[in-house]
Image (cartoon, rainbow, N blue to C red):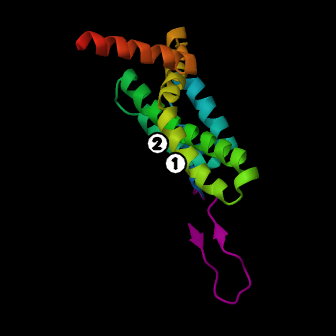
Amino acid sequence: KLNTPAAGSGRLPDVDKTTPRSNADRAKKKLDEINPKYGKLKKFLGILLINAPFLALDVIAIVSVVNSDASEDEKIEKIGGILGGAVGGAALGAIAAALTAAWSGPGAILFAIIGGITGSILGDEVGRIIARYLLKNAVPNPRELKSLTPSGLDELREQVLEVHEEDA
């Protein structure tokens, strides 16, 4: 709320300090609404807000999912998608821009966009693993992690080919 002084009085308007002034402020207030049983998630989101305040709307969305009536598995799916898309997109976009800036100059912007889109798509499974850990304290099994590595992808491809050959 703003208390506006008369024009020409030389006074600055009084600002109500309780009203959030940015999305990051709103997200910090929303963090207080998280159920105490999700302490790890609350701490993670707090750190995320400090280091990447531009993800404030994603944090607000995650808090809304956590406070919903959805089942634990549905919450993990939704939060994993948000985390994977936002964090994966930002990280891969920054990496792509940094790696290409030296040799492509202004083309680094294009590579950052491509990297961001790719990271948001590929980060989905990583986001689910992180969400499962933060909500259920469930450590991923080695098979899950192996599927995210290049050699794991080769193994997965071989399994898919075997299934395809059996169907033929």
Q: Amino acid at mark 2?
A: Ala
Give me the residue at 60% from left, 35% from top. Answer: 45
User: Is residue 3 inside the magenta stretch?
Assistant: yes
Percent x, y of residue 86: 54, 41
Q: Is residue 2 above or below residue 53?
A: below
Quarter of the picture containing the C terminus is: top left
Instruction: Give coordinates of residue 143: x percent, y percent.
Output: 50, 10
Q: Check whether the beta carbons of the residues at disc 2 and disc 1 lie within 8 A of each other.
A: yes
Distance Cα–Cα, label 2 vs label 1: 6 Å
| Residue at the (36%, 16%) spot, across then down | 161
Residue that mark 1 sits on:
57
97 or 120, nearer to the observer? 97
What's the magenta region?
1-21
Whether residue 100 is situated above or below residue 67 in the rendered picture: below
* Left or right of residue 125, residue 73 in this image: left
Residue 145 horizontal/vertical position (percent): 55, 16
Residue occupying the far left of the picture: 168
| Vertical arrangement, residue 35 with respect to residue 151, above or below | below
Relative to 124, is 135 above or below?
Answer: above
The answer to which quarter of the image holds residue 36 is top right
Residue found at x 74% / y 52%? 103
Identify the residue at the far right of this view.
Answer: 102
Is residue 4 visible in this depiction of the protein?
yes
Instruction: Confirm whether residue 18 shows in the render.
Output: no
Number of residues whose C-alpha sits closer than 10 Å to that of mark 1, classed few (under 14), some (14–19) or many (20 or more) = some
Q: Amino acid at mark 1?
A: Leu
Q: Check disc 2 and report the residue beneath it.
A: 61
Tell me the element at label 1: helix
